[in-house]
Image (cartoon, grey):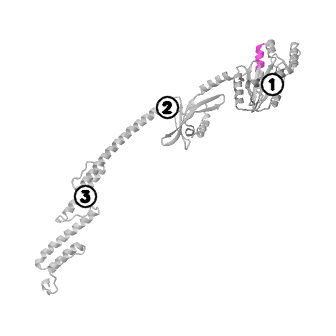
Amino acid sequence: MTSDDLPKKTREPPEILLFRYLKDVFYKPGSVELALDELPENFKNLGRALMFFSESVAETRELAMALSKGNLEARLPSRGNEIAAPLKSLHASLKHLTWQTREVAKGDYKQRVNFMGDFADSFNSMIEQLSENREALLQEIESGKKKSEALKESNNLLEAITKQISQWIVVICEDSGEWLYANREPGDVLKNAEWETDLRAWFRDRIDAPRKENAQPYELELPSVGTHQYFSVVAHSIYWYGHKAAAFVLTDVSSEKRRLLKLETVAYRDPLTKTFNRHYGMETLIEWLSEGRSFVICFVDLDNLKYVNDKFGHNEGDKYITLTANLLSLFSEGAILCRLGGDEFMILSEEMSAYEAEIRLEELRTHLLHSEAGVIGPNIRSLSYGVIQVQTDNTSSASELLGIADEKMYQYKRSHKMARKSSIDAIEKNEYPKTQTTIL
């Protein structure tokens, strides 16, 4: 039985069937179906045409969905599907654009898009900017390379120069204390290898010196048996290859220091006794007075020096002066002993009272009196002294105080005049006793 054989009241008009089919093509693409055998013969060709149209729409829809998701590997519509032709063209353009983008990513900035309207303009503009940025970056890299090479050459030059200069440069990390740079090894600078440990400790103790002292110079003394090494040190706060560091510049001033010490010896030391001279003694006395210190002044005078010079010669007189100076140097550890000139000495001490100083001087006088050396027997060498106490509220001048001490010394000398005369008479008669006392 065909549709023509059906009763007319059960058959739908063919145009209704085709309309419903066409509607399902758009709104129910997954379940669309057309029963050709239900169509009259004169509508079947139209039905076949609509079915082809439906297939073309489905293929076009499938490709459009794939493109919307960025899937360029989707199956393309059949060759006779003219509805999908624009989408296939778009697919081809997108495939080419993808290739061009990959080429741009590889560095080919000559790629240009001459289709797709505004997108092409934006894409081409982006490529031009990338090309310009790349050129600018390459120039910057080239400039950086040149600067790096120049910096490397400068560093090589600086290192060569620092190795030639007389100063010793040491750069130390503030955080770890590690030596970051030194233009010389310690063994090439230090006279004594054992000093390196002390030197490194000295650096560690002053690692923050540049920030505290504003690059003020230090004097570094490295002592050893029989010799010293002196450095003038200036510290600077710097950054060294990302490290916060201190740069120490050391100048060996040992020869200059020794020369100054020698000049100081000449300026402040008595050449015969090696004690301080009058200039140093008076400077110290005036300084102590200005500081309001409490101390004693001991004025000491050798007895019988003129007799020793006349009787035994000035060589023995010099030995007498030296012997007395050596003895007086034992007065106390912190005392200042100076030769004022000729047979006069001065002792300044903060450690003793006037009473204690007189007891000590009497002990030293006794040892000197009973000493026997060379051609001079005992009881000839002796000393007289005068001691005064200087208080913190003193108002007298240095010369006034020395005058008072000198007067007390003469009082002492006068009180022992007869004993000195007896000793000289015994020498003249060759009657002095044969005794000997070891000096303290």
Residue bounds of the magenta highlight: 313-321
Q: Does 160 appear in magenta?
A: no
Q: Nearer the viewer, residue 181 or 253?
A: 253
**Label 1 to label 3: alpha-carbon separation:** 119 Å
Residue 119 seen in render: yes
Residue at horizontal 66 percent and vertical 30 percent from the top = 225
Question: Callout 3: 10 Å neighbours few (<14), some, many (20+)?
Answer: some
- Residue type, numbered disc 2: Thr
For marks 2 and 1 on the same chain, the one whose residue lies earlier in the sequence = 2
Q: Are marks 2 and 1 in contact (CB under 8 Å)?
A: no
Report which residue position mark 1 lands on: 386
- Residue type, numbered disc 3: Leu
For marks 2 and 3 on the same chain, the one whose residue lies earlier in the sequence = 3
Q: Position of residue 433 (x, y in %)?
A: 88, 19
Report which residue position mark 3 lands on: 94
- Residue type, numbered disc 1: Gly
Q: Does 316 appear in magenta?
A: yes
Q: Which mark is residue 311?
A: none
Q: Please state, as top left, top right, bottom left or bottom right, where the C terminus lies in the image.
A: top right
Residue 108 seen in render: no
- Magenta: main secondary structure equals helix
Report which residue position mark 2 lands on: 162
Is label 3 in a helix, a strand or a loop? helix
Q: Is residue 217 above or below residue 38?
A: above
Q: Is residue 394 left or right of residue 4?
A: right
**Label 2 to label 1: alpha-carbon separation:** 61 Å
Residue at horizontal 22 percent and vertical 67 percent from the top = 59
Residue at horizontal 13 percent and vertical 76 percent from the top = 44
In the picture, residue 423 is in which quadrant?
Answer: top right
Residue at horizontal 16 percent and vertical 79 percent from the top = 16
Q: Is residue 28 above or below residue 436?
A: below
